[in-house]
Image: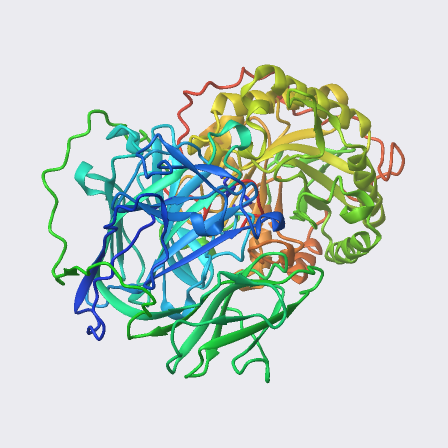
Amino acid sequence: MERKRLEQRLKLPLAAVFFLAVAALVMIATPGQSQSASGVLYTFDGAPASPVRFNPADWDIAVTSRDQETWDTLPAMQAAHGPGCDAPPATHTVTEYEQTVFQCKDHIMTSLFATGYGVTYLTPSSMVDFSTGTATIKWDMSTLSVTQRDFIDLWITPFDLNQVHPLDDFLPDLQGEPKEAIQIRMDQSPTGPIFRGKVVRNFQATEVESNWWTGYNTVLTQDAKRRDTFQLEISRTHIKFGMPQYNLWWIDTDIANLGWSGGVVQFGHHSYNPFKDGNGGPNTWHWDNVSINPATPFSMNKADRRMVNTNGASVNLAQATASGGKLRFSGIGKIDVSFDGGTTWTAAVKQQQELQKADHFSSYWTSIPAGVSKVTFRGGPDDWFKSWEVKDISVWSKGGSSSVPAPLPTATSVPPTAVPPTATPVVPTATVPAPTAIPAQPTAVPTKTAVPGTGAPAANTRIKWQGKDWYLQGVNMPWYNWQCDFGCAESNGVSNAGNKSSIAARFAKLQTAGEKNVRWWLFPGDPWQITRDANGAPSGINPAVYADIDAALALAQQYDLTYTFTLFSGPTALPSSWLTNPTQRTQLATVLGELFAHYNGNARIMTWQVINEPEWDIWSGKASQSDVQSLVKQVAAQVHANSKQYVSVGAAMVDGLPLWKGLGLDYYTAHWYDYMSGGDWCAFCSDYAAIKAKYNLDAPLLIGEFYAGSDVNPLQRFSDMYSKGFAGAFAWSLFPEKTADNLPVDLNAAAAFAAQKTDIGPKGTTSGGGTGGGTIPSLPTATPTKTATPAPTATATVVAPTKTPTATATAVAPTK
């Protein structure tokens, strides 16, 4: 599963993956305007002598940065426009939160630099209204993109479900996605920035079909000064997004009925350590002429302070609250509020949110009585996190108009008619053809009635281990503490007594259920455990890694388990030079060879899996196919030279398997989830014999991730995986509370399945041969991949599918 994810997914990015626009100023809807009666247009008229903070009464400005040392002051960056509002490339210094959104020369800018993760959201006090048909959101924006780690996105969320800082759940901050939403986000491709879209229903995100292969570099030259028009057309059943003047549309697709007909519009600017991996640093995005048509106004009543973190501190609202209002803010820690100056207190109420991470800011949405003009706060620790803070405070209510502490620019009304077509579209000077073959778009989830198994599996479809052929029934751990299981030792690694006890309790349940295999991620996210020389090249492995692996092997011996250790969570999780620089790539493989040699002969480690779901980064243009293949081939050679264990790749889907042929793998693995309900990526719609024939596979195939919760008839699913001839199947996940997706494994069904079979294993592994494991007598005889043809080149015909998981990033935990 990709840690989403962006990157991804990050699955980030991821990586990260990402997006759209931010906007700006003048209020056009007059107070008392009837719902859906007209649209609104926000312009940024005004030419101050120097950059001026943008913070009008009718726009909510919410800025956050993850790392605690940046909560008060941001790292310095050079933002576009000089101290006298001189045009780019002139710059001025930004260090304060209040400086991140500013006005110059009749438009506004967003500039943000976060060394960890940060995002700015701009929200107008007008909701988009598509209750009577199609609505249009349109704005003008600069196109210069200096880094893949600085991007924009757009969220549309029902009013009562809005979040202060919505975020893809694969990214390393905040609390995930709203319960219901539409998102358009910027991502990257070999031809420049692209945009993807997704629909979120009950916290489950589904990416919509898009023209992901055509970046806007095919129709324009990137420019910080010129602002081009971006346009979203949305109804309850259709989404269309692109750049109309170029006739470039990334999305134009039907969707299942949303069940809601309007929402809050939020423009986001994200900063994800933008200098990392040789990227170009933080960007400035320029915005102008934001229109929403039709639009429905709502009231914003903003506080006079950006943040508070002292018990008893108060904020003053611009005016006394009306009835039905909601106190809205972003907070961390346990927060109490008082509406009577501290005489009485009540616990602030969190908005419905996907995740519950104590060390991340959450969105709050608390009812507030009428007539309140001052709110007082107090706070305390939430679980282990000891700090508290509240920021970006306001009161929202439906209807009415926003409070106006200072005069607003002249309003401009927009008639409620459809947005007229633009002039004749510019014909692109260069075009990028669509891939010649794209896997079929999934149909309406036929997975529960997918092709059943046909009975006993064919010969030579199992994995030989210690002289016996086994069906590898198992689970994905995939981690207990992200980035810390192997390397944090007694502080928070597997060696920690409390962690080891908790893992042991879950492993005992595995043993009772007859599960024999665990897939565990070794270096997820940034592989900090691999030490680096002065040039940033791999130089060794932190000794604490060995202590934690030894602790894990002791658990495997106690509960008769065998491990697949997945080395890396995705290509973009690695420092880029480790992939692109042949010398550093070889150094990485050599360093890993020391790890393999250390555990040579330990039968509790069956497989070293090089990387998880690398296809997403390859097909999105974030990593070179040939670089990733070279790394896989070199690591496979090190496994075989230094150990008696196997090597594999965690392919995202079966139609990615041709990428990994001829690289020295001992068997293949691919992932399958219910959204892969048709077409070439649907492993469950076929069987091993058909897949082997289609892709000319030369080794067994194991399903490395799939869902086996109680709501999908898991016993039948286990049985079908077995009878379809796969070499095994690892369900996701043993610790659902540790991942954002919360997908559990029905261990009762697993036990019932295991009781029916005699070849589930390995089991009864002999002791000895190293810490916690047994001696491996020999490798399986069927390993033709060691002498197979050379790695395929970057011109291989495998192409990305039309639909991807909810996100693709590799720096954080995935959601499936």
Q: Quadrant of residue 726?
A: top right
Name the residue: 19% across, 74% down. 34
The answer to which of 420 and 717 lies nearer the viewer is 420
What colour scheme has been applied to the protein in the rendered image? rainbow
Residue 132 relative to residue 159: left or right: left
Residue 307 appears at what percent x and percent y? Answer: 53, 61
Residue 108 appears at what percent x and percent y? Answer: 31, 47
Q: Is residue 481 above or below residue 246?
A: below
Q: Is residue 153 above or below residue 133?
A: above
Name the residue: 30% across, 63% down. 257
Residue 645 appears at what percent x and percent y? Answer: 73, 29
Q: Is residue 509 visible?
A: yes
Task: Indicate the quadrant containing the N terminus: top left, top right, bottom left or bottom right.
Answer: top right
Name the residue: 28% across, 67% down. 261
The answer to which of 309 and 453 lies nearer the viewer is 309
Residue 542 relative to residue 612: left or right: right
Q: Is residue 675 visible?
A: no
The answer to which of 69 and 15 lies nearer the viewer is 69
Name the residue: 36% across, 66% down. 158
Residue 528 relative to residue 74: left or right: right
Q: How many numbered marks, from 0 up? A: 0
Q: Is residue 682 above or below residue 465?
A: below
